[in-house]
Image (tube, helix red, strand yellow):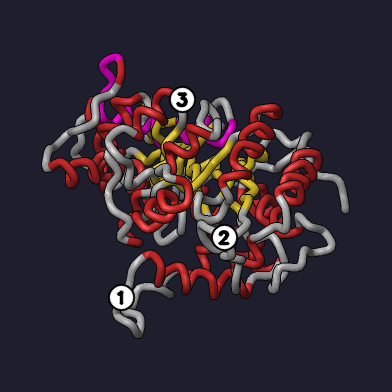
């Protein structure tokens, strides 16, 4: 942190898990459904309706709104968990990566670095015979080779762009057959790619994985060689007591998404166990229900306070304060989870912001982290991006 007469300079923030198109749902899933049984799965039905309607033009427009809002809030790096690939009905576009390109272009225009995490998706659920249906056909590939060929095409296209990383993202144990997991892990390891995956977000996912494989999701990933320093377990909400140790032993990341997890009623992860095991934490906006990276960052600890009934649960390494530890999670760790070595610059927080009035200088970062919001961030113009991909 560097303090000037009018601003506080801090490392830029990172949001390591985003579904930018879901910004188009804001306000659309906050009323009771006709059945009255509202949960993650009823929300997913509403999300699928939006996914079914997307075009290259609309996904670009929605993503640009989402990314501009993130940049104004102090974010400079985003991990985009991109899973809408094909036309309605499932037929690939003539240019198979046109939707991914639209999302990458939106991020660059908004002034963000982006890790495009190309999702692999194959089925509607665990077990035989659960073929993709409805909007899921837009997510799914006929083979793993087809999905990885798209990753290769994106890697080649953006090889010269310092603000773009490409990774691979098996969607979940629900959507990816166990037989594909080892091959995805080998492919990524050979190329040094980040691997992101939804892990243990919902109890139903765990129950289905146990029924199919006899393993819980993290156990299965460990068995198939997926865990490692470049692996990011998104959510990790419903882990068994021994599973954080599997993530920690691999030096894997756990990406928590507090504002989305509370919106969906997902539950509270065991942050203490993840940190004690050595898993590296980062945060993500996920569904864009609200754009507030400060709330996602402090939500890591505030959720743990709710779960444990204790205050100030987070302890930084080497004497770091809780606020310093949280900023590291919200900044450097998120950038690393996206494949970047550093936060990508700094942001300025207004010293005269009303939220910081009467705060002692030595407590400024504490107030920024626990009481701040995007309103305290000074906007800066988006930079011009060099190294555009070749014309199609």
Location of residue 286 with respect to 300 vertically, above or below: below
Q: Which residue is drawn at the image coordinates 35% and 80% (left, top)?
A: 33
Q: Is residue 338 above or below residue 133?
A: above
Q: Tell me the CA gap for discs 3 and 2.
A: 31 Å
* Circle on res. 128: 2
Residue 114 included in the magenta stretch of the image? no
Any mark on residue 37, and which?
A: 1
324 in the magenta segment = yes
* Circle 1 crowding by C-alpha within 10 Å: few under 14, some 14–19, many from 20: few
Of residues 324 and 82, which is closer to you in this image?
82
SS at badge 1:
loop
Residue 192 pos. (x, y %): 66, 28
Going 30% across and 19% down the picture, which residue do you hit?
317
Query: Is disc 3 placed on a helix, strand or loop?
Result: loop
Q: Earlier in the sequence, mark 3 or mark 2?
A: 2
The numbered dot on residue 250 is 3
Place residue 348 in its image quadrant: top left
CB atoms at circles 3 and 2 under 8 Å apart?
Answer: no
Question: How far apart, in angstroms, are the residues tagged by discs 2 and 1?
Answer: 28 Å
Which residues make up the magenta segment? 318-339
**Image location of residue 373, percent across then percent down:** 34, 49
Circle 3 or circle 2, nearest the eye: 2
Q: How many numbered discs sit on the rendered protein?
A: 3
* Marks 1 and 3, the one that precedes in the sequence: 1
Q: CA distance from mark 1 to mark 3?
A: 38 Å
Q: Which quadrant of the figure has residue 157?
A: top right
């Amino acid at each position: 942190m560097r303090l000037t007469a009018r601003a506080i300079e801090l490392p830029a923030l990172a949001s390591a898990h985003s579904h930018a198109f879901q910004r188009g749902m804001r306000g659309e899933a906050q009323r009771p459904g006709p059945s009255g049984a509202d949960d993650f799965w009823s929300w997913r039905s509403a999300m699928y309706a939006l996914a079914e309607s997307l075009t290259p033009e609309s996904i670009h427009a929605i993503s640009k709104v989402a990314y501009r809002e993130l940049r104004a809030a102090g974010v400079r790096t985003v991990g985009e968990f991109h899973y809408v690939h094909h036309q309605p009905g499932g037929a690939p576009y003539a240019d198979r990566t046109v939707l991914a390109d639209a999302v990458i272009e939106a991020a660059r225009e908004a002034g963000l670095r982006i890790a495009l995490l190309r999702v692999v998706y194959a089925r509607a659920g665990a077990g035989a015979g659960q073929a993709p249906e409805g909007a899921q056909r837009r997510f799914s590939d006929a083979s793993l080779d087809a999905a990885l060929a798209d990753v290769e095409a994106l890697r080649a296209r953006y090889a010269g762009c310092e603000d773009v990383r490409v990774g691979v993202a098996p969607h979940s144990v629900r959507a990816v057959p166990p037989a594909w997991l080892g091959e995805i892990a080998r492919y990524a390891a050979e190329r040094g790619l980040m691997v992101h995956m939804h892990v243990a977000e919902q109890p139903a996912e765990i129950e289905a994985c146990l029924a199919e494989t006899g393993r819980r999701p993290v156990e299965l990933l460990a068995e198939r060689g997926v865990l490692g320093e470049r692996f990011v377990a998104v959510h990790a909400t419903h882990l068994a007591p021994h599973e954080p140790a599997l993530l920690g032993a691999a030096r894997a990341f756990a990406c928590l998404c507090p504002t989305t997890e509370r919106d969906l009623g997902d539950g509270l992860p065991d942050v203490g166990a993840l940190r004690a095991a050595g898993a590296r934490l980062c945060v993500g906006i996920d569904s864009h229900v609200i754009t507030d990276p400060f709330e996602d960052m402090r939500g890591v600890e505030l959720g743990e306070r709710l779960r444990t009934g204790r205050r100030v649960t987070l302890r930084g390494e080497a004497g770091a304060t809780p606020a310093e530890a949280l900023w590291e999670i919200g900044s450097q760790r998120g950038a690393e989870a996206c494949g970047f070595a550093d936060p990508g610059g700094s942001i300025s927080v207004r010293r005269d912001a009303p939220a910081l009035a009467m705060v002692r200088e030595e407590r400024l970062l504490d107030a920024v982290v626990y009481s701040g919001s995007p309103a305290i961030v000074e906007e800066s113009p988006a930079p011009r991006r060099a190294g555009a991909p070749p014309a199609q």
